[in-house]
Image: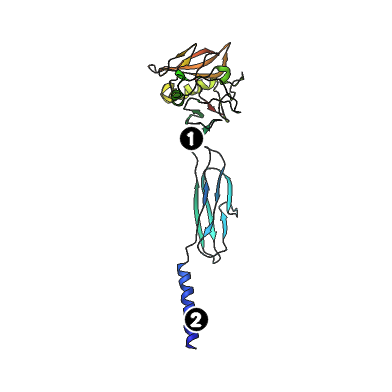
Amino acid sequence: MIKNSVFLLLIAVALLFVQCNREPLGTDPKITNLSDYESNDGAIIINAKGGKAPYTIVWSDETIDTIISDLSAGFYYATVTDAKGRTFIDTIQVTQPPYPVCIDVEGNSYKTSFFGEQVWMIDNLNVTKNPVGVEIENLVGDDSLYNANEVGRLYTWNVAMNDSISEGTQGLCPDGWHIPSDEEWFQLTDFATSEGLELSEVFEPQFAGFYNNGFNGLDVSASYWSSTKAQNNAWKRYFHKELSKVFRYHEKQENAISIRCIRN
């Protein structure tokens, strides 16, 4: 009789020890943050732990699942209930890049920035293939790979436009981006003016110079294509390191200058 009592007491102590040392109810979420600004490709996989299985998981929108996907950036709330009726509420944040991601067909990434409602690359394009991977003609200041990495490459208008003549065409820009039109350049200038700034202060040109029967202006000037024709030429914007004013000129289409892309 005493032995049985001792045995039962030991079992009770063991059960109490297990109960007291059981891991508290909680979660172990796996988060996939957005791949691009304002995209909707976030996801959360949530696994309950501790407490006593089985568990139920209910999200704030009443979804009952361990996985939710196609998420935008923000906070998501999951209520986990274990077999004993205990609950745990987890707050999980899905984040996004601070600026839109811009990656070309060769995997080169470019910094971007918001200017009013526009989003522009703030690096010069540095690509040697068009968006479907075909090699294209390009020039590098002083034929230097260092210069290509620092200030991008130079392209004739037809190459920049990928043989299109339509305003706002993608041209050599990454998917989701295009060659800015002359009007979009005006809009960027208007934004700078509204901020009390010169366009050169907002745009931060990289001084790759230009090619016209030879390289000119490296480290001193920068010229950027628009997708708008000017009779047999095309409109561009011209920056000079020693001048705050930005000039609107038309450039011969066979000359080679820089590209900045704008988001669609």
Q: Quadrant of residue 208?
A: top left
* Image x and y of residue 202, in percent: 43, 25
Question: Is any atom of residue 158 visible in this view?
Answer: yes
Q: Quadrant of residue 219?
A: top left
Q: Quadrant of residue 106?
A: top right
Q: Amino acid at mark 2?
A: Leu
* Image x and y of residue 114, in percent: 48, 30
Question: Is any atom of residue 182 visible in this view?
Answer: no
Q: Amino acid at mark 1?
A: Tyr
How crowded pointer 2 is (Cα within 10 Å; few <14, some 14-19, many 20+) is rated as few
| Earlier sequence position, callout 2 versus callout 1 | 2
Q: Please indicate whether residue 242 sits to the left or right of residue 61 in the image.
A: left
Q: Is residue 33 above or below residue 166?
A: below
Judged from the image, the secondary structure of the residue bearing numbered disc 2 is: helix
Q: The C terminus lies in which quarter of the figure?
A: top right
Numbered label attached to residue 83: none
Q: Please indicate whether residue 210 sits to the left or right of residue 158 in the image.
A: left
Q: Is residue 74 above or below residue 14?
A: above
Report the residue at 52% width, 48% height from top. Answer: 31
**Residue at the far left in the pictured view:** 242
Report the residue at 57% width, 42% height from top. Answer: 41
* Colouring: rainbow
- The residue closer to the viewer here, 41 or 244, is 41
How crowded pointer 1 is (Cα within 10 Å; few <14, some 14-19, many 20+) is rated as some
**Which residue position is annotated with label 1?**
99
Q: CA distance from mark 2 to mark 1?
A: 65 Å
* Image x and y of residue 29, in percent: 51, 52
Closer to the observer: label 2 or label 1? Answer: 2
* Image x and y of residue 241, in percent: 39, 18
- The residue closer to the viewer here, 155 or 32, is 155
Q: Please indicate whether residue 99 sits to the left or right of residue 133 in the image.
A: left
**Which residue position is annotated with label 2?**
8
